[in-house]
Structure formats: C-alpha cells, structure tokens
Amino acid sequence: MLCGGPGIELDTRVEGGSGTDSLSPFPPADLPDRYEAGTPNTPGVAGLGAGVQCVLREGVEAIAARERSLSERLRRGLADIEGVTLHGPRPGADAAPVVSVAFTGLPSAEAAFILDRAFGIAVRAGLHCAPEAHRVAGTLETGLVRLSLGYHSTEDDVDAAIAACAEIAVKAAAHR
C-alpha cells in the first residue's frame, strides 16, 4: 500500500508500461498510475528457467542457425507479396527472428485479428511500446504486425504465415 498527501512528491522506484498511454515514453503524471509499473512477471521467470535448460540442452549455435533459417524463409516470402511492406532487415541480413510488416490499407490491429481468428496465427500488433521508432518508420498511425519465430517454430508454420499474409493482402486490395 502507498499513502501520500498534498506536498508529498515521491520518485518512481520502478518505471515501466502503465497501459494508460502507450504513445508516451514517460510514466504517467496522474496518481496512482505514476507508481504502478505493472505486475511482476512470475510466469516469465519460470519460463526463463525452462528456456535456459533448453539452451543448455540444444546449444546456442544450433538454435541460432534454426532461427536464422526460419526468419530468412519468412522475410523472403513476405517480401514477395504485393500489399505487404517488410520493415526492418531485408532478406539476407543477419537479424533476430522477429519480422515486422504493414498491410497496405489495413491497420495492424485488424490484420492481427484476422491472422488470429481466420488462420490461428498469433502475432503482436501496434506500436510495440516504441512510438519513436514508428514515427521514424512512418507507421505511427497504423502500427505494424510483428511475427516472432523461435526454435520450435517449423517451416510449415512459416509457410502458413506467408500464405495467410498473402490472402489478407489480396482481400485488403479488393476492398480499397
């Protein structure tokens, strides 16, 4: 519990997303939101332990090679789709297995909803807590769809994502 009163100005102990204003790079000024840095990520800590065990078992190089191969396949497939704009590293670049795209004429939240509901593909959409990066990229109004791959993703997963994105792009073009 935190108690305060007139004239008491407390510094934030921990800062993080409050969920009240995703466009702001600063914690909110309003109380009590200013002092709510979010819930500790207990499941994330447990997941980290399991992840460390997986890395020790499989090996860093094997994991990196698999993720590079999958992300290259995804980047190449998405780069060829009319109506899909690939943001970030292009095919052939050494990059993390995270791929961000925009669909012409379709907000990222709507594209993510369609990917989830119609295709069973989980993605993230929006500004990804990085409004300045989106301002520079010109995607501040629509955000981006972020596809993340991991060691346990498959070539079939990647191919399904490419096909789904192509279908969404075609349908979006038909409605423009």
Image: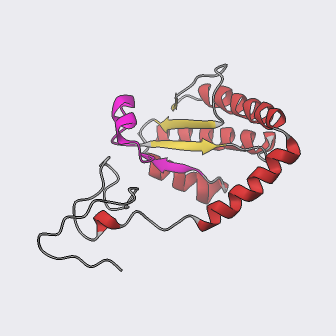
Please provide percent x and percent y for residue 133. Answer: 39, 35
The vertical placement of 133 against 39, above or below, is: above
Q: Nearer the viewer, residue 117 or 153?
A: 153
In the rendered image, the residue lying farthest to the top is 92
Where is residue 97? Give x, y as percent.
Answer: 66, 36
Tell me where residue 134 appears, x and y as whole percent.
38, 36
Q: Residue at x 29, y 63 (%)?
A: 34
Q: Which region of the structure is painted magenta?
A: 123-142
In the picture shown, does residue 101 fall above or below 107? above
Q: Give coordinates of residue 27: x percent, y percent.
A: 30, 55
Residue at image coords 36%, 67% = 36
Asked if residue 129 is among those painted magenta in the image, a careful observer would answer: yes
Indicate left or right for 88 with 5 as reference.
right
How many marks the image carries: the answer is 0
On the rendered structure, is 161 left or right of 63? Answer: left
Residue 149 location, quadrant: top right
Q: Quadrant of the N terminus?
A: bottom left
Q: Quadrant of the image for the C terminus? A: top left
Residue 118 is covered by the magenta coloring: no
The colour scheme is secondary structure
Q: Quadrant of residue 37?
A: bottom left
Question: At 44% across and 65% down in the image, what residue appears?
Answer: 38
Q: Is residue 165 left or right of residue 110?
A: right
Residue at the extreme left = 7
95 left or right of 109 in image: right
**Foreground: 48 or 88?**
48
Q: Front-most of 148 and 35?
A: 35
Is residue 136 placed above or below 146 in the rendered structure? above
Q: Name the residue: 76% across, 45% down.
A: 153
